[in-house]
Image (cartoon, rainbow, N blue to C red):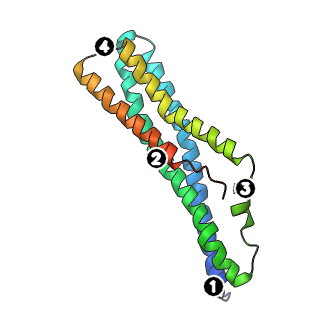
């Protein structure tokens, strides 16, 4: 029988780091797959709408799908950033106090890249395109070509407000900082 590993403060901090990185990795996978899900939802709604101009009301399916997927994307993206922030501000100093400086250098180093700002702006544009511009375009096509009854117009206006709200949240949560 093997002896149990000695529990030290450094070991506890490393285990916490490993668990946080595993959670971060799974959230990154989910977040990235949500972009593909949004593309698939967009393609499905457009494919269902194209055969007949009498189906433009189907375009009203895209905004709620977008808000649902976009909000899930945003929440996961925020948690990914929060994990990184916790590692940089709490875990790294705690482990450095135990084992010395120079731990988890990558956690801070990759944020200092001189092209990070342009990448983050481009990512913000992609996020807004995927989760806000697509449903806004669907709503616009519905308003121009759809059968405008008061219930559908009311739904479309509520959806429009939800998409704008999501866009604002995506912009507010964009992690544009370098440090």
Q: In the displayed structure, would residue 82 be above or below residue 113?
A: below
x then y, percent, for residue 74 = 49, 47
User: Nearer the observer, disc 1 or disc 3?
Assistant: 3
> Residue drawn 64% across and 38% down?
122
Q: Secondary structure at mark 3?
A: helix
> Closer to the N terminus: mark 4 or mark 3?
3
Q: Secondary structure at mark 1?
A: helix
**Tags 2 and 3 touching, CB below 8 Å:** no
Q: Residue placed farthest to the left in the image?
A: 150
> What distance separates the C-alpha of mark 1 from that of mark 3?
29 Å
> Residue 72 — which label?
2
- Please state if 73 lies on the left or on the right of 64 as rendered: right
> What distance separates the C-alpha of mark 2 from that of mark 3?
28 Å
- Residue 97 image-quadrant placement: bottom right
> Closer to the N terminus: mark 2 or mark 1?
1
Residue highlighted by disc 4 = 147
Residue highlighted by disc 3 = 112
> What distance separates the C-alpha of mark 2 from that of mark 4?
31 Å
Q: In the displayed structure, would residue 125 be above or below residue 31?
A: above
Q: Nearer the viewer, residue 176 or 9?
A: 176
> Residue 9 — which label?
1
> What distance separates the C-alpha of mark 4 from that of mark 3?
52 Å
x then y, percent, for residue 83 = 57, 62
x then y, percent, for residue 32 = 58, 44
Mark 4 crowdedness (10 Å alpha carbons): few <14, some 14-19, many ≥20: some
Mark 3 crowdedness (10 Å alpha carbons): few <14, some 14-19, many ≥20: some
- Tell me if residue 177 can be seen: yes
x then y, percent, for residue 109 = 74, 60
Mark 1 crowdedness (10 Å alpha carbons): few <14, some 14-19, many ≥20: few
User: Nearer the observer, disc 4 or disc 3?
Assistant: 3
């Amino acid at each position: 029988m093997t002896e149990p590993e000695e529990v030290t403060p450094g070991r506890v901090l490393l285990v916490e780091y490993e668990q946080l990185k595993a959670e971060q990795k799974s959230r990154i996978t989910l977040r990235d797959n949500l972009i593909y899900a949004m593309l698939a939802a967009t393609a499905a709604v457009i494919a269902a709408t194209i055969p007949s101009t009498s189906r433009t009301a189907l375009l009203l399916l895209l905004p709620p799908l977008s808000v649902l997927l976009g909000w899930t994307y945003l929440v996961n993206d925020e948690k990914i950033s929060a994990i990184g922030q916790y590692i940089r501000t709490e875990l790294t100093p705690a482990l450095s106090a135990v084992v010395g400086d120079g731990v988890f250098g990558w956690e801070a180093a990759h944020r200092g890249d001189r092209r990070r700002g342009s990448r983050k702006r481009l990512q913000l544009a992609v996020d807004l395109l995927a989760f806000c511009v697509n449903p806004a375009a669907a709503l616009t096509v519905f308003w121009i070509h759809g059968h405008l009854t008061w219930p559908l117009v009311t739904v479309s206006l509520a959806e429009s407000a939800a998409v704008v709200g999501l866009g604002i949240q995506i912009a507010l949560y964009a992690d544009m900082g370098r440090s």
